[in-house]
Protein backbone atom coordinates (compact mmCIF):
# COMPACT_ATOMS: atom_id res chain seq x y z
CA UNK A 1 0.00 0.00 0.00
CA UNK A 2 1.32 3.48 -0.86
CA UNK A 3 0.77 6.71 1.01
CA UNK A 4 -2.22 8.75 -0.20
CA UNK A 5 -0.16 11.42 -2.01
CA UNK A 6 2.38 10.36 -4.64
CA UNK A 7 5.84 11.08 -3.18
CA UNK A 8 7.28 11.89 -6.61
CA UNK A 9 4.74 14.69 -7.00
CA UNK A 10 5.83 16.20 -3.67
CA UNK A 11 9.52 15.89 -4.65
CA UNK A 12 8.97 17.39 -8.09
CA UNK A 13 7.08 20.40 -6.75
CA UNK A 14 9.63 20.92 -3.97
CA UNK A 15 12.48 20.79 -6.49
CA UNK A 16 10.95 23.72 -8.32
CA UNK A 17 10.71 25.81 -5.14
CA UNK A 18 13.56 24.83 -2.86
CA UNK A 19 16.21 27.19 -4.29
CA UNK A 20 14.00 30.16 -3.40
CA UNK A 21 13.25 28.68 0.03
CA UNK A 22 16.93 28.21 0.83
CA UNK A 23 17.73 31.76 -0.25
CA UNK A 24 14.84 33.21 1.79
CA UNK A 25 15.89 31.08 4.75
CA UNK A 26 19.46 32.36 4.57
CA UNK A 27 18.18 35.95 4.41
CA UNK A 28 15.92 35.44 7.42
CA UNK A 29 18.89 33.84 9.19
CA UNK A 30 20.95 36.99 8.64
CA UNK A 31 18.16 39.20 9.98
CA UNK A 32 17.74 37.03 13.08
CA UNK A 33 21.52 36.82 13.59
CA UNK A 34 21.52 40.60 13.96
CA UNK A 35 18.96 40.09 16.74
CA UNK A 36 21.17 37.52 18.43
CA UNK A 37 18.99 34.60 17.34
CA UNK A 38 20.35 31.38 15.74
CA UNK A 39 17.77 30.42 13.10
CA UNK A 40 18.83 26.73 13.06
CA UNK A 41 18.10 26.43 16.78
CA UNK A 42 14.61 27.86 16.26
CA UNK A 43 14.08 25.57 13.27
CA UNK A 44 14.98 22.49 15.34
CA UNK A 45 12.54 23.50 18.08
CA UNK A 46 9.77 24.10 15.54
CA UNK A 47 10.50 20.75 13.86
CA UNK A 48 9.77 19.02 17.21
CA UNK A 49 6.42 20.86 17.56
CA UNK A 50 3.19 19.09 16.68
CA UNK A 51 -0.54 19.73 17.00
CA UNK A 52 -3.15 16.98 17.00
CA UNK A 53 -5.89 16.71 14.37
CA UNK A 54 -9.48 16.30 15.58
CA UNK A 55 -10.89 13.23 13.79
CA UNK A 56 -14.23 15.05 13.64
CA UNK A 57 -12.58 17.89 11.74
CA UNK A 58 -11.85 16.02 8.48
CA UNK A 59 -15.53 15.82 7.60
CA UNK A 60 -17.40 18.97 6.56
CA UNK A 61 -18.85 20.70 9.61
CA UNK A 62 -22.13 22.48 10.01
CA UNK A 63 -24.22 24.63 12.25
CA UNK A 64 -27.60 24.11 13.86
CA UNK A 65 -29.14 25.40 10.67
CA UNK A 66 -27.54 23.09 8.13
CA UNK A 67 -24.51 21.16 6.99
CA UNK A 68 -23.44 21.21 3.32
CA UNK A 69 -21.27 18.11 2.86
CA UNK A 70 -18.40 18.34 0.38
CA UNK A 71 -17.11 15.75 -2.03
CA UNK A 72 -15.56 12.49 -0.74
CA UNK A 73 -16.75 12.83 2.85
CA UNK A 74 -15.05 10.27 5.12
CA UNK A 75 -17.45 7.38 5.84
CA UNK A 76 -15.78 5.98 8.91
CA UNK A 77 -12.71 6.30 11.13
CA UNK A 78 -10.42 4.59 8.57
CA UNK A 79 -11.32 7.20 5.92
CA UNK A 80 -10.77 9.91 8.54
CA UNK A 81 -7.36 8.42 9.34
CA UNK A 82 -6.37 8.39 5.66
CA UNK A 83 -7.34 12.08 5.37
CA UNK A 84 -5.30 12.80 8.51
CA UNK A 85 -2.47 10.90 6.80
CA UNK A 86 -2.64 13.35 3.87
CA UNK A 87 -2.42 16.31 6.26
CA UNK A 88 0.65 14.82 7.99
CA UNK A 89 2.29 13.70 4.73
CA UNK A 90 2.15 17.24 3.30
CA UNK A 91 2.32 19.63 6.28
CA UNK A 92 4.45 17.50 8.67
CA UNK A 93 3.05 19.28 11.75
CA UNK A 94 0.31 16.90 12.94
CA UNK A 95 1.77 13.58 14.16
CA UNK A 96 -1.29 12.65 16.23
CA UNK A 97 -5.07 12.33 15.91
CA UNK A 98 -7.65 12.89 18.65
CA UNK A 99 -10.60 10.49 18.42
CA UNK A 100 -14.18 11.07 19.55
CA UNK A 101 -16.34 8.22 20.87
CA UNK A 102 -18.79 6.96 19.65
CA UNK A 103 -18.28 8.92 16.37
CA UNK A 104 -15.04 6.91 15.76
CA UNK A 105 -16.12 3.52 17.06
CA UNK A 106 -14.70 0.54 15.15
CA UNK A 107 -14.60 -3.22 15.65
CA UNK A 108 -10.81 -3.71 15.65
CA UNK A 109 -8.69 -1.14 17.52
CA UNK A 110 -5.54 -3.09 16.70
CA UNK A 111 -6.29 -2.71 12.98
CA UNK A 112 -6.90 1.02 13.51
CA UNK A 113 -3.63 1.42 15.38
CA UNK A 114 -1.83 -0.35 12.51
CA UNK A 115 -3.49 1.89 9.92
CA UNK A 116 -2.44 4.94 11.94
CA UNK A 117 1.13 3.64 12.06
CA UNK A 118 1.14 3.28 8.28
CA UNK A 119 0.30 7.00 7.99
CA UNK A 120 2.96 7.93 10.57
CA UNK A 121 0.25 8.86 13.05
CA UNK A 122 -0.32 8.21 16.75
CA UNK A 123 -3.31 8.97 18.96
CA UNK A 124 -3.63 11.95 21.30
CA UNK A 125 -6.36 12.45 23.90
CA UNK A 126 -9.61 10.52 23.45
CA UNK A 127 -12.85 12.50 23.75
CA UNK A 128 -15.99 11.20 25.41
CA UNK A 129 -19.46 12.27 24.29
CA UNK A 130 -22.27 12.63 26.80
CA UNK A 131 -23.75 15.63 24.99
CA UNK A 132 -25.85 13.62 22.52
CA UNK A 133 -28.02 10.49 22.77
CA UNK A 134 -27.08 7.33 20.89
CA UNK A 135 -29.70 4.97 19.37
CA UNK A 136 -31.01 2.57 22.03
CA UNK A 137 -29.48 4.57 24.89
CA UNK A 138 -31.33 3.88 28.15
CA UNK A 139 -31.17 7.37 29.64
CA UNK A 140 -31.24 10.68 27.71
CA UNK A 141 -28.71 13.45 28.22
CA UNK A 142 -31.32 16.13 27.45
CA UNK A 143 -31.02 17.49 30.98
CA UNK A 144 -27.35 16.72 31.46
CA UNK A 145 -25.01 13.82 31.96
CA UNK A 146 -22.34 13.74 34.70
CA UNK A 147 -24.39 16.31 36.68
CA UNK A 148 -27.85 14.94 35.83
CA UNK A 149 -30.34 14.83 38.73
CA UNK A 150 -30.99 11.16 37.96
CA UNK A 151 -28.36 8.76 39.38
CA UNK A 152 -28.87 6.17 36.61
CA UNK A 153 -28.19 8.78 33.93
CA UNK A 154 -25.02 9.88 35.74
CA UNK A 155 -23.93 6.24 36.06
CA UNK A 156 -24.49 5.75 32.31
CA UNK A 157 -22.33 8.79 31.57
CA UNK A 158 -19.59 7.57 33.91
CA UNK A 159 -19.73 4.13 32.23
CA UNK A 160 -19.26 5.75 28.81
CA UNK A 161 -16.15 7.59 30.00
CA UNK A 162 -14.72 4.35 31.42
CA UNK A 163 -15.30 2.72 28.03
CA UNK A 164 -13.41 5.62 26.39
CA UNK A 165 -10.46 5.00 28.73
CA UNK A 166 -10.43 1.31 27.73
CA UNK A 167 -10.49 2.20 24.04
CA UNK A 168 -7.79 4.80 24.58
CA UNK A 169 -5.54 2.24 26.22
CA UNK A 170 -5.89 -0.02 23.17
CA UNK A 171 -4.79 2.72 20.76
CA UNK A 172 -2.08 4.31 22.91
CA UNK A 173 -3.84 7.48 24.10
CA UNK A 174 -2.68 8.91 27.43
CA UNK A 175 -5.49 11.29 28.19
CA UNK A 176 -9.29 11.56 28.36
CA UNK A 177 -10.94 14.84 27.43
CA UNK A 178 -14.22 15.43 29.23
CA UNK A 179 -16.44 18.19 27.90
CA UNK A 180 -20.06 18.11 29.09
CA UNK A 181 -22.88 20.22 27.68
CA UNK A 182 -24.58 20.12 31.10
CA UNK A 183 -26.26 23.38 32.12
CA UNK A 184 -29.56 25.24 32.04
CA UNK A 185 -31.60 27.54 29.81
CA UNK A 186 -33.67 29.30 32.44
CA UNK A 187 -32.92 31.12 35.72
CA UNK A 188 -33.98 28.76 38.49
CA UNK A 189 -33.91 25.67 36.27
CA UNK A 190 -30.75 24.28 37.92
CA UNK A 191 -29.32 24.38 41.46
CA UNK A 192 -25.80 25.56 40.64
CA UNK A 193 -24.00 24.08 43.70
CA UNK A 194 -25.85 20.74 43.71
CA UNK A 195 -25.20 20.32 39.97
CA UNK A 196 -21.49 21.01 40.49
CA UNK A 197 -21.41 18.51 43.38
CA UNK A 198 -23.08 15.84 41.22
CA UNK A 199 -20.56 16.55 38.45
CA UNK A 200 -17.70 16.11 40.94
CA UNK A 201 -19.14 12.87 42.32
CA UNK A 202 -19.30 11.45 38.78
CA UNK A 203 -15.90 12.84 37.78
CA UNK A 204 -14.31 11.21 40.84
CA UNK A 205 -15.46 7.80 39.58
CA UNK A 206 -13.89 8.48 36.18
CA UNK A 207 -10.72 9.81 37.84
CA UNK A 208 -10.45 6.62 39.91
CA UNK A 209 -10.38 4.55 36.71
CA UNK A 210 -7.53 6.51 35.09
CA UNK A 211 -4.35 4.48 34.44
CA UNK A 212 -1.33 5.80 36.36
CA UNK A 213 0.21 7.66 33.46
CA UNK A 214 -3.02 9.19 32.15
CA UNK A 215 -4.50 12.70 32.45
CA UNK A 216 -8.13 13.77 32.67
CA UNK A 217 -8.57 17.04 30.81
CA UNK A 218 -11.59 19.11 31.86
CA UNK A 219 -12.87 21.43 29.12
CA UNK A 220 -14.83 24.50 30.26
CA UNK A 221 -17.28 26.35 28.01
CA UNK A 222 -19.29 29.53 28.60
CA UNK A 223 -22.43 28.41 26.75
CA UNK A 224 -23.99 26.08 24.08
CA UNK A 225 -25.86 23.87 24.06
CA UNK A 226 -27.08 25.44 27.33
CA UNK A 227 -27.60 29.17 27.09
CA UNK A 228 -28.22 30.40 30.68
CA UNK A 229 -25.57 28.49 32.64
CA UNK A 230 -23.14 25.61 32.13
CA UNK A 231 -21.82 23.42 34.96
CA UNK A 232 -18.15 23.88 33.93
CA UNK A 233 -18.64 27.41 32.60
CA UNK A 234 -15.20 28.96 32.98
CA UNK A 235 -11.63 28.35 34.01
CA UNK A 236 -12.55 28.99 37.63
CA UNK A 237 -15.06 26.14 37.76
CA UNK A 238 -12.67 23.92 35.82
CA UNK A 239 -9.74 24.73 38.13
CA UNK A 240 -11.86 24.09 41.25
CA UNK A 241 -12.89 20.71 39.87
CA UNK A 242 -9.34 19.77 38.80
CA UNK A 243 -7.92 20.70 42.20
CA UNK A 244 -10.64 18.73 44.01
CA UNK A 245 -10.14 15.66 41.77
CA UNK A 246 -6.38 15.33 42.06
CA UNK A 247 -3.03 15.69 40.25
CA UNK A 248 -4.08 13.78 37.11
CA UNK A 249 -6.91 16.23 36.46
CA UNK A 250 -6.06 19.39 34.54
CA UNK A 251 -7.83 22.17 32.62
CA UNK A 252 -8.13 22.24 28.82
CA UNK A 253 -8.53 25.64 27.17
CA UNK A 254 -10.63 25.72 24.00
CA UNK A 255 -10.01 29.20 22.59
CA UNK A 256 -13.63 29.50 21.43
CA UNK A 257 -15.21 28.75 24.79
CA UNK A 258 -15.03 32.24 26.25
CA UNK A 259 -16.98 35.44 25.95
CA UNK A 260 -15.64 37.69 23.15
CA UNK A 261 -12.36 39.48 24.03
CA UNK A 262 -11.67 37.49 27.19
CA UNK A 263 -7.92 37.53 27.89
CA UNK A 264 -7.08 33.86 27.25
CA UNK A 265 -3.32 34.32 27.65
CA UNK A 266 -3.98 35.54 31.20
CA UNK A 267 -6.14 32.46 31.89
CA UNK A 268 -3.40 30.11 30.76
CA UNK A 269 -0.86 32.03 32.86
CA UNK A 270 -3.03 31.37 35.93
CA UNK A 271 -3.45 27.70 35.03
CA UNK A 272 0.33 27.44 34.61
CA UNK A 273 0.83 28.97 38.05
CA UNK A 274 -1.58 26.37 39.45
CA UNK A 275 0.22 23.60 37.50
CA UNK A 276 -3.15 22.73 36.00
CA UNK A 277 -2.74 23.52 32.29
CA UNK A 278 -3.79 20.40 30.33
CA UNK A 279 -3.62 21.86 26.87
CA UNK A 280 -5.53 23.58 24.12
CA UNK A 281 -8.18 23.24 21.50
CA UNK A 282 -7.06 25.76 18.93
CA UNK A 283 -9.53 27.55 16.67
CA UNK A 284 -10.64 31.12 16.13
CA UNK A 285 -13.85 33.02 16.72
CA UNK A 286 -15.38 36.45 16.45
CA UNK A 287 -18.61 36.02 18.36
CA UNK A 288 -19.24 32.61 20.02
CA UNK A 289 -17.83 29.09 19.72
CA UNK A 290 -17.49 29.67 15.99
CA UNK A 291 -14.82 26.96 15.54
CA UNK A 292 -13.19 28.94 12.74
CA UNK A 293 -9.70 28.12 11.47
CA UNK A 294 -6.99 28.87 14.05
CA UNK A 295 -5.47 32.30 13.56
CA UNK A 296 -7.82 33.14 10.69
CA UNK A 297 -9.44 36.08 12.56
CA UNK A 298 -7.02 36.99 15.38
CA UNK A 299 -3.52 35.65 14.65
CA UNK A 300 -2.05 38.05 17.24
CA UNK A 301 -4.21 36.44 19.94
CA UNK A 302 -2.81 33.02 18.99
CA UNK A 303 0.72 34.45 19.12
CA UNK A 304 0.06 35.88 22.61
CA UNK A 305 -0.96 32.40 23.80
CA UNK A 306 2.37 30.98 22.63
CA UNK A 307 4.24 33.97 24.00
CA UNK A 308 3.03 32.99 27.50
CA UNK A 309 3.90 29.31 26.94
CA UNK A 310 7.40 30.04 25.61
CA UNK A 311 8.09 32.50 28.46
CA UNK A 312 7.02 29.89 31.04
CA UNK A 313 9.17 27.19 29.43
CA UNK A 314 12.13 29.60 29.31
CA UNK A 315 11.65 30.31 33.02
CA UNK A 316 11.83 26.56 33.72
CA UNK A 317 8.18 25.85 34.52
CA UNK A 318 7.55 22.15 34.02
CA UNK A 319 4.43 21.60 31.93
CA UNK A 320 3.46 19.47 28.94
CA UNK A 321 0.34 20.84 27.31
CA UNK A 322 -1.53 18.83 24.69
CA UNK A 323 -1.93 20.89 21.53
CA UNK A 324 -4.97 20.07 19.42
CA UNK A 325 -7.05 21.76 16.76
CA UNK A 326 -10.82 21.79 17.30
CA UNK A 327 -12.50 23.38 14.33
CA UNK A 328 -15.57 23.01 12.12
CA UNK A 329 -14.95 23.39 8.41
CA UNK A 330 -18.26 24.49 6.94
CA UNK A 331 -17.14 26.17 3.71
CA UNK A 332 -13.61 24.88 2.97
CA UNK A 333 -12.02 21.53 2.17
CA UNK A 334 -11.30 20.26 5.70
CA UNK A 335 -7.89 18.90 4.67
CA UNK A 336 -6.82 22.31 3.36
CA UNK A 337 -8.13 24.09 6.45
CA UNK A 338 -6.44 21.66 8.85
CA UNK A 339 -3.08 21.90 7.05
CA UNK A 340 -3.30 25.70 7.00
CA UNK A 341 -4.36 25.86 10.66
CA UNK A 342 -1.65 23.49 11.85
CA UNK A 343 0.94 25.65 10.07
CA UNK A 344 -0.59 28.80 11.57
CA UNK A 345 -0.25 27.31 15.07
CA UNK A 346 3.34 26.31 14.24
CA UNK A 347 3.94 29.87 12.97
CA UNK A 348 2.69 31.39 16.25
CA UNK A 349 5.02 29.11 18.21
CA UNK A 350 8.00 30.00 15.96
CA UNK A 351 7.31 33.73 16.32
CA UNK A 352 7.05 33.39 20.12
CA UNK A 353 10.53 31.82 20.10
CA UNK A 354 11.85 35.06 18.55
CA UNK A 355 10.88 37.32 21.45
CA UNK A 356 13.93 38.87 23.15
CA UNK A 357 13.05 37.58 26.65
CA UNK A 358 15.86 39.37 28.48
CA UNK A 359 14.91 42.72 26.97
CA UNK A 360 11.24 42.04 27.69
CA UNK A 361 11.94 41.19 31.34
CA UNK A 362 13.96 44.41 31.66
CA UNK A 363 11.22 46.51 30.04
CA UNK A 364 8.58 44.92 32.32
CA UNK A 365 10.67 45.58 35.43
CA UNK A 366 11.18 49.17 34.28
CA UNK A 367 7.47 49.62 33.44
CA UNK A 368 8.54 50.58 29.93
CA UNK A 369 5.24 49.54 28.35
CA UNK A 370 6.07 50.74 24.85
CA UNK A 371 9.33 48.82 24.61
CA UNK A 372 7.68 45.72 26.09
CA UNK A 373 4.83 45.63 23.59
CA UNK A 374 7.18 46.56 20.74
CA UNK A 375 9.32 43.49 21.54
CA UNK A 376 6.26 41.28 21.12
CA UNK A 377 5.21 43.00 17.89
CA UNK A 378 8.74 42.68 16.51
CA UNK A 379 8.54 38.89 16.91
CA UNK A 380 4.95 38.69 15.64
CA UNK A 381 5.75 40.79 12.59
CA UNK A 382 8.71 38.59 11.65
CA UNK A 383 7.79 36.56 8.56
CA UNK A 384 8.93 33.06 9.50
CA UNK A 385 7.51 31.48 6.32
CA UNK A 386 10.99 30.37 5.03
CA UNK A 387 11.69 28.67 8.36
CA UNK A 388 8.39 26.78 8.28
CA UNK A 389 9.00 25.81 4.63
CA UNK A 390 12.45 24.47 5.57
CA UNK A 391 10.94 22.41 8.38
CA UNK A 392 8.51 20.83 5.91
CA UNK A 393 11.17 20.34 3.24
CA UNK A 394 13.61 18.72 5.70
CA UNK A 395 10.76 16.61 7.09
CA UNK A 396 9.81 15.17 3.68
CA UNK A 397 6.67 17.28 3.42
CA UNK A 398 5.54 19.76 0.78
CA UNK A 399 6.92 23.28 0.65
CA UNK A 400 3.41 24.39 -0.41
CA UNK A 401 1.02 21.79 1.06
CA UNK A 402 -2.26 23.23 -0.24
CA UNK A 403 -0.99 23.67 -3.83
CA UNK A 404 0.52 20.17 -3.77
CA UNK A 405 -2.71 18.73 -2.34
CA UNK A 406 -4.74 20.37 -5.10
CA UNK A 407 -2.29 19.16 -7.74
CA UNK A 408 -2.61 15.61 -6.38
CA UNK A 409 -6.33 15.44 -7.18
CA UNK A 410 -6.83 13.55 -3.89
CA UNK A 411 -10.33 14.96 -3.24
CA UNK A 412 -11.60 13.94 -6.69
CA UNK A 413 -9.99 10.55 -6.26
CA UNK A 414 -11.70 9.75 -2.94
CA UNK A 415 -14.96 11.17 -4.30
CA UNK A 416 -14.93 8.27 -6.76
CA UNK A 417 -14.96 5.67 -3.95
CA UNK A 418 -16.84 7.50 -1.20
CA UNK A 419 -20.54 7.93 -1.93
CA UNK A 420 -21.83 11.51 -1.87
CA UNK A 421 -23.16 12.42 1.55
CA UNK A 422 -26.65 13.84 1.81
CA UNK A 423 -26.90 17.44 3.04
CA UNK A 424 -29.74 18.81 5.13
CA UNK A 425 -29.97 18.64 8.93
CA UNK A 426 -27.68 20.68 11.18
CA UNK A 427 -24.94 19.62 13.49
CA UNK A 428 -21.18 19.98 13.58
CA UNK A 429 -20.52 16.50 12.09
C1 LIG B 1 -17.40 21.51 22.52
C2 LIG B 1 -16.12 20.99 21.87
C3 LIG B 1 -15.53 19.78 22.53
C4 LIG B 1 -15.76 18.64 21.57
C5 LIG B 1 -16.74 19.18 20.62
C6 LIG B 1 -16.68 18.54 19.28
O1 LIG B 1 -17.78 22.69 21.92
O2 LIG B 1 -15.21 22.03 21.76
O3 LIG B 1 -14.14 19.89 22.62
O4 LIG B 1 -16.12 17.49 22.16
O5 LIG B 1 -16.47 20.55 20.55
MN1 LIG C 1 -13.11 21.77 22.10
Image (cartoon, grey):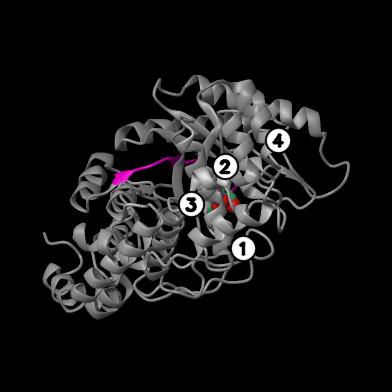
Q: In this rendered view, identify the residue nearer to me: 3 or 94.
A: 94
Name the residue located 40 percent from the left edge and 47 percent from the top edge: 98
Q: State yes or no: residue 127 in magenta.
A: yes
**Badge 1 or badge 2: first in the primary sequence:** 1
Q: Please identify, in this view, whether the residue under mark 3 or under mark 2 is nearer the observer.
A: 2
223 lies left or right of 42: right
Structural distance between the alpha carbons of marks 3 and 4: 30 Å
Residue at horizontal 24%, vertical 80%? Answer: 407
Label 2 SS? helix
Q: Identify the image quadrant of residue 196.
A: top right
Ligand 2 within 8 angstroms of badge 2 C-beta: no
Most common secondary structure along the magenta stretch: loop
Tell me how far mark 1 sits from mark 4, CA to CA: 21 Å
Task: Answer with mark 3 or mark 2, whichever residue precedes in sequence.
Answer: 3
Q: Which residue is mark 4?
A: 236
Question: Which label sits in the foreground, 4 or 2?
Answer: 2
Q: Nearer the viewer, residue 95 or 344?
A: 344
* 321 up-or-down from 425: above or below: above
Earlier in the chain: of badge 4 and badge 2, it is: 4
- What is the C-alpha distance between the residues marked 1 and 3? 26 Å
Quarter of the picture holding the N terminus: bottom left
Where is residue 56 drawn, in percent x and y? 44, 56
Residue wearing tag 1: 285
| Residue with the mark numbered 2 | 361
Per the rendered image, the range of residues in magenta is 122-131
Q: Nearer the viewer, mark 1 or mark 2?
A: 2
Amino acid sequence: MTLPIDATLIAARNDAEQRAVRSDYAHLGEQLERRGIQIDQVREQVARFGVAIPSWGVGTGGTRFARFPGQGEPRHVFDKLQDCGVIQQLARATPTVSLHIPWDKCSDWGELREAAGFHGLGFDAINSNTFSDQPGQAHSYKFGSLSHTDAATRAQAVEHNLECIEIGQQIGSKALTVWVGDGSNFPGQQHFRRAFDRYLESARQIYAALPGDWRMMLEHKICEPAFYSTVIQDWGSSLMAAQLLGPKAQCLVDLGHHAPNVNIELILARLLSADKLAGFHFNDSKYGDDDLDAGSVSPYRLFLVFNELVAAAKEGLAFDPAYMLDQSHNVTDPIESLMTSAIQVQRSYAQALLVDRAALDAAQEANDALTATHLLKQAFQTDVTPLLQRVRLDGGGAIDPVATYRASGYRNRVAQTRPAAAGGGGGIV
